[in-house]
Image: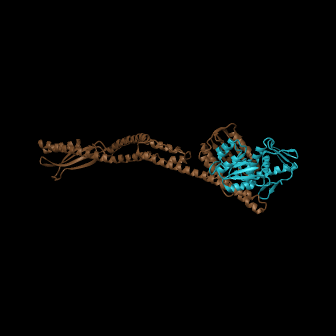
Chain colours: A cyan, B brown
């Protein structure tokens, strides 16, 4: 999978690339408007991470260009502005998602995963991992071909782990993923623990291997060698 | 508070009115003795003239007639009896004294006991070569009668003056101070956050024109510094987002290190928490700046009842986690014109507040009607400091991970739509009222 990171902050671009490394992703960088424009018009990417405020131009222009050329690259806008207008405009111009800075890398990875899945397996979008079978369209989970009933949040969590396999995900990141901006105001993130516990229980009861590990003091990890 | 002040305050124009009235009273009161003195003096001098005239007439008449001494004395004693005002008595030997004037109190006549004031002239005459003593006395009005008459008239004039003052004052107040009250009204209606300056009306009065000019400059300066401050907040928050994103990403990466010890993980976790708090404060400051900068302008009719129910649903797991009971009294179909995002934030912040500061097995009450809603919750058994409650960072402390901006944002949203919000602590419940 080819990913283009259009970001003028080299340290942030590097972190993103480091996090995605090893997950079958090939990352390229563009740090200015010209460089980005050239790359997106020349090559094709599975996913483009687009910062809107770029030296040399407005990131929106890149989106417009992609649309004009009818390119099928997935695009996630990563912006410091978090302005509703930008979000609406960006999505209208064909971006798949909008993520406001600062974000957790795990959140970004989950969104990249989801964008790529959507773009590539639009019709038969099924994630298979050993005994697990997730149908993204029907939002169902089968273990050993037996349906397992998950709540919306549990299903959401499972997908989040799928996008962050073999990564340690902090509790904070999960809390923010589950409750969005509201996580800001909640003083304890025990609800994350409750959802994880339930998910784990359901998986185990259905005869699933224990992939979901608790990492001491920090968070959780979905292990899948 | 305002009412208490109003009770003690005087209107500007009433202050000189009081002073004028008091001054008029003093002057008029002072005029009473002055009038008395003048009237009395004129009166006495007139009477003295009259008495002298009587004396001269007696002198002249006596010098013309020739009369026997014995008959004269007999006639005189009879005359003196009938007419006590003029008294002429023979003297044993001549007295060399000039005429003298005097005032005396005595009964008017022999039959009356009521004493009156008399002005007298005492003179020594020679009639038929014999010395005589003549006194001419004329009744004068008593001093107290004069004074009371003058006082009565003066008081009448005083009343006229006061009525005149009040009427004139009202006329002047209505006309002369009109531009002033207009300016005052405009300033009262002024709202800094609306960013609209005031256009004062031209007046022909120099002082008011100067006042308006100074106010205009002051307001414009205020608006521009307020604008700068808001822009600064927005820009600063924006600028902070990228470095925060870098730190966040580095911590996320560090977490991936397989060789992390438990202790190191804890350090990262602590750093994560602090960073989350920083991001949250930054995000909320940005939100506040945006609300103040008149963003979120789109409005639509919003079903508040629906919004409240959705919010409660969304938060249900957090409510259940603390085993909190919800007491809902939601009137259905309450619509209000507003921005959806802002209203969601308003309701979520109030509900989250009620959850966060609640106790285990506590209660949250949500009451909802056409013109107001109330969110109440159990919690600490003492009232919160209402003076600082809605101020930025006033509730923030090391123990609570709150950004200290939740209620400031609520307040700001209420301000935007001119809704009233207030807090009370009643029957062990912390209540937030929003009236719209």
x, y percent for residue B384: 65, 52
Q: Residue at x 39, y 46 (%)?
A: B20
Q: Is residue B149 visible?
A: yes
| Nearest to the observer: residue B232 or residue B394 | B232
x, y percent for residue A105: 73, 53
Q: Residue at x 45, y 47 (%)?
A: B211
Q: Is residue B140 left or right of residue A60?
A: left
Quarter of the figure with residue B195: top right
x, y percent for residue B353: 69, 49
- Extreme residue in the top direction: B333
Relative vertical location of residue B422 with respect to residue B270 in this rendering, above or below: above
Q: Is residue B210 left or right of residue A162?
A: left
Q: Quadrant of the C terminus of chain B?
A: top right
Quarter of the figure with residue A170: bottom right
| Nearest to the observer: residue B4 or residue B225 | B225
Q: Is residue A188 visible?
A: no
Quarter of the figure with residue B13: top left
- Extreme residue in the front direction: A42
x, y percent for residue B174: 44, 40
């Amino acid at each position: 999978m080819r990913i283009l990171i259009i970001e003028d902050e080299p340290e942030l671009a590097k972190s993103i690339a480091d996090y995605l490394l090893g997950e079958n992703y090939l990352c390229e960088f563009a740090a200015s408007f010209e460089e980005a424009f050239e790359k997106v018009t020349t090559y094709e990417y599975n996913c483009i991470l687009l910062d809107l405020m770029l030296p040399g131009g407005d990131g929106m222009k890149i989106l417009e260009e992609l649309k004009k050329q009818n390119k099928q690259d997935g695009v996630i806008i990563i912006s410091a502005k978090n302005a509703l207008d930008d979000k609406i405009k960006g999505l209208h111009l064909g971006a798949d998602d909008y993520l406001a800075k600062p974000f957790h890398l795990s959140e970004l990875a989950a969104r990249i995963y989801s964008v790529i899945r959507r773009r590539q397996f639009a019709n038969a979008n099924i994630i298979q991992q050993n005994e697990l079978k997730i149908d993204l369209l029907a939002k169902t989970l089968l273990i050993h071909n037996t349906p397992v009933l998950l709540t919306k949040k549990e299903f959401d969590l499972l997908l989040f782990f799928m996008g962050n396999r073999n990564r340690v995900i902090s509790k904070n990141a999960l809390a923010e993923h589950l409750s969005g901006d509201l996580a800001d105001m909640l003083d304890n993130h025990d609800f994350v623990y409750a959802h994880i516990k339930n998910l784990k229980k359901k998986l185990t009861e259905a005869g699933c291997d224990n992939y979901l590990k608790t990492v001491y003091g920090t968070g959780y990890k979905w292990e899948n060698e | 508070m305002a009412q208490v002040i109003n009770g003690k305050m005087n209107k500007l124009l009433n202050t000189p009115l009081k002073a004028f009235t008091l001054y008029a009273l003093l002057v008029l009161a002072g005029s009473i003795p002055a009038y008395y003195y003048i009237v009395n003096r004129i009166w006495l001098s007139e009477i003295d003239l009259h008495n002298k005239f009587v004396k001269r007439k007696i002198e002249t008449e006596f010098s013309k007639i020739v009369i026997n001494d014995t008959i004269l004395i007999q006639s005189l004693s009879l005359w003196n009896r009938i007419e006590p005002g003029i008294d002429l008595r023979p003297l044993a030997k001549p007295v060399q004294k000039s005429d003298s004037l005097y005032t005396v109190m005595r009964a008017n006549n022999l039959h009356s006991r009521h004493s009156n004031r008399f002005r007298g002239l005492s003179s020594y005459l020679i009639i038929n070569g014999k010395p005589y003593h003549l006194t001419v006395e004329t009744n004068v009005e008593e001093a107290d009668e004069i004074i009371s008459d003058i006082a009565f008239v003066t008081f009448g004039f005083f009343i006229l003056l006061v009525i005149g003052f009040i009427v004139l004052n009202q006329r002047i107040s209505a006309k002369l101070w009109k531009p002033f009250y207009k300016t005052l009204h405009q300033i009262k209606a002024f709202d800094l956050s609306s960013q609209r300056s005031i256009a004062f009306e031209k007046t022909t009065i120099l002082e008011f024109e100067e006042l308006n000019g100074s106010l205009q400059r002051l307001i414009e300066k205020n608006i521009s510094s307020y604008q700068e401050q808001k822009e600064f907040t927005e820009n600063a928050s924006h600028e902070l987002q990228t470095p925060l994103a870098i730190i966040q990403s580095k911590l996320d990466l560090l977490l991936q290190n397989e060789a992390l010890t438990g202790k190191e993980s804890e350090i990262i976790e602590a750093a994560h928490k602090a960073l989350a708090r920083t991001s949250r404060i930054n995000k909320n400051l940005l939100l506040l700046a945006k609300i103040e900068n008149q963003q979120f302008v789109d409005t639509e009719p919003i079903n508040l009842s629906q919004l409240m129910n959705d919010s409660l649903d969304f938060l249900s797991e957090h409510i259940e986690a603390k085993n909190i009971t919800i007491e809902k009294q939601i009137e259905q179909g309450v619509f209000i014109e507003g921005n959806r995002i802002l209203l969601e934030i308003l309701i979520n912040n109030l509900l989250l507040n009620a959850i966060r500061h609640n106790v285990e097995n506590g209660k949250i009450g949500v009451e909802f009607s056409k013109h107001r809603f109330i969110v109440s919750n159990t919690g600490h058994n003492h009232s919160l400091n209402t003076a600082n409650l809605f101020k930025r960072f006033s509730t923030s402390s090391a123990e609570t991970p709150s950004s200290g901006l939740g209620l400031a944002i609520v307040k700001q949203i209420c301000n935007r739509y001119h809704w009233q919000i207030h807090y009370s602590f009643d029957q062990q419940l912390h209540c937030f009222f929003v009236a719209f």
